[in-house]
Amino acid sequence: MKKRWLSLILIALLLLPLHTFSPSGISEAAQQFKLGNEVLMEKYHHLIAGKKVGLVTNQSGVNRQGVSTIDVLAKDLTVQLVALYAPEHGIDGVAKAGEHVKSYDHPKLKIPVYSLYGSTRMPTEDMLRNVDVLLFDIQDIGARTYTYISTLHNVMVAAQKYDKPVIILDRPNPVGGIHVEGPVLEDLYKSFVGIDNIPKAHGMTVGEMALFFNRNINATITVIAMEGYNRNMIYQDTGLSWVQTSPNIPDIESVFGYMATGLGEGTGIHMRDTFKWIGSRDLNAQRYANLLNSAGLPGVTFIAEPYYNGLIGGVRLHITDYHQFNPARTGIYALAFAYQIGDFKVPKSSASNIVMFDKVMGTNKIGQFLEQKMSPQEIEARYAPALERFKAERENYLIYGYAPGYQPPMSQRIAVFVNDQEIDFDVDPYIDQNDRLMVPVRFIVEALGAQVQWHGPTQKVTITKGNRNSQFTIGSNIAYVNGTRMVYDTHPVIRHDRTMVPTRYVAESMGATVEWIEETRTVLIELTS
């Protein structure tokens, strides 16, 4: 078996201090920013010199001067550009969404332009036969359902199969690397609009996404990182001009609107004006706008805008702060409020047919929550546990840090979930002097499906579930679990007239696993028996 090298990241920029922002937060960043395709030619050209190169790209694959990577490589006498590979919408980005694109020969370069959105969505052995190395240079928009990252995934799978190295020329996530939002895709709902277990907004660059994909693929990949880039940056901070990535994404406003207005596939709730408006027939536009504005979603206001003589009601997004605006979260609110005041049916998947709505959501649960007319806050709480697990996992694949002095937002509230259900406490959980999370015993025990008994004279708490039994005592770090004496580093206390117990020790005594996620102050408890 041939040796597989671990993913290689060329990130010389991270060996230097991150740049500082000018007062506007734009000009200095733009001066220092370089795309992966520029860094390749300036510092790592030796990776392609003398090679037969295949390039996966489209019209968005340009440098900051707007020069196509196709043209850069075609004019490079040390490189032999032998094939192009086009994603959805074609090499020029004009084909409609879902429209199959045919392969053909490039009229000027006289090389094949292979379609990866036609008879096949993965490079075949014949397509790769004459290639020494593959380059990937396509601008993504930060959404799971935007299929360019699915093409990246499939290219990596084929490259691994046919022993071809892949070089990813990194580009910015235009909506930034801070907002990670939405339901995480479940295995049953994998498709070309959801190729891996990621949330609607993944908050990663294509280079980081490639590293994440590669945990299951084991391809030989190299990421040429950007310079002067950090997670706080959105596209406007780079100084780049936006190049239309697909017919419905002509400008940066459409990029930010995509996940906010494009989630209602098959429900009757739809977008218009290239993802800048959302609404539906028989929806009261002003009531809809009032609900959305009252939610206090950061960075955006909603303007009531009906059309067709008021028969179609909806709202236009007015983004007031692109850094604060959270597109995917806004989309969940837009759907939930529409269902609360309108009369819509949820498309239903069957064993033989997964409907597009569920593919877009990555699960059938969001449809169920909408049918129950859950509030958007309730829906958020339901998908939060899986989202927090993804956030923790993605840390292993991030290339870029935050801007100097920036601290990711952290709520002081501590959330506790048992099997994806958040527990509502009447006394807030807290972290004690021994760095252990303390919670009211009755609430955690009931959530675990166990029973609790309190013996006042001895101040003992007895917890039972099936054949499991544990006993804790107020003020004592000695407990008994199934008759075995245990010595812990903290002990139960009485606080605000509630018996507070260490979450981990109680949960584990009942056969559960416990995970603490520091970044979001969240506890995830899973019952294993």
Image: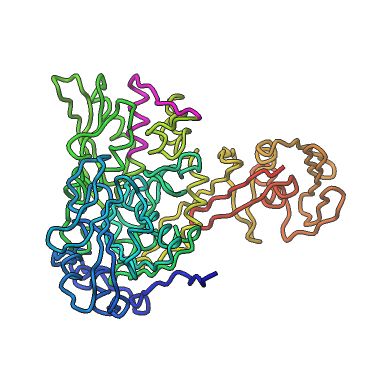
* 330 sits left or right of 74 in the view: right
347 falls in the magenta region: yes
Picture mark count: 0
Q: Which residue reaches farthest right?
A: 483
Indicate left or right for 215 with 448 as reference.
Answer: left
User: Which image quarter is the C terminus in?
Assistant: top right
Which residue is rendered at x = 50% and y = 50% of the image?
Answer: 388
Tell me what residue is drawn at x 50 percent, y 48 percent: 413
- Residue 175 at x, y percent in the picture: 29, 53
Find residue 58 and report its image quarter.
bottom left
Residue 215 image position (x, y, % from top left): 49, 60
Q: Which residues are magenta?
A: 331-351
Question: Closest to the observer: 520 or 30?
Answer: 30
The color scheme shown is rainbow
Of residues 147 and 126, which is closer to you in this image? 126
- Visible in this render: residue 33? no
The correct choice, above or below, for 342 with respect to 443 in the image is above
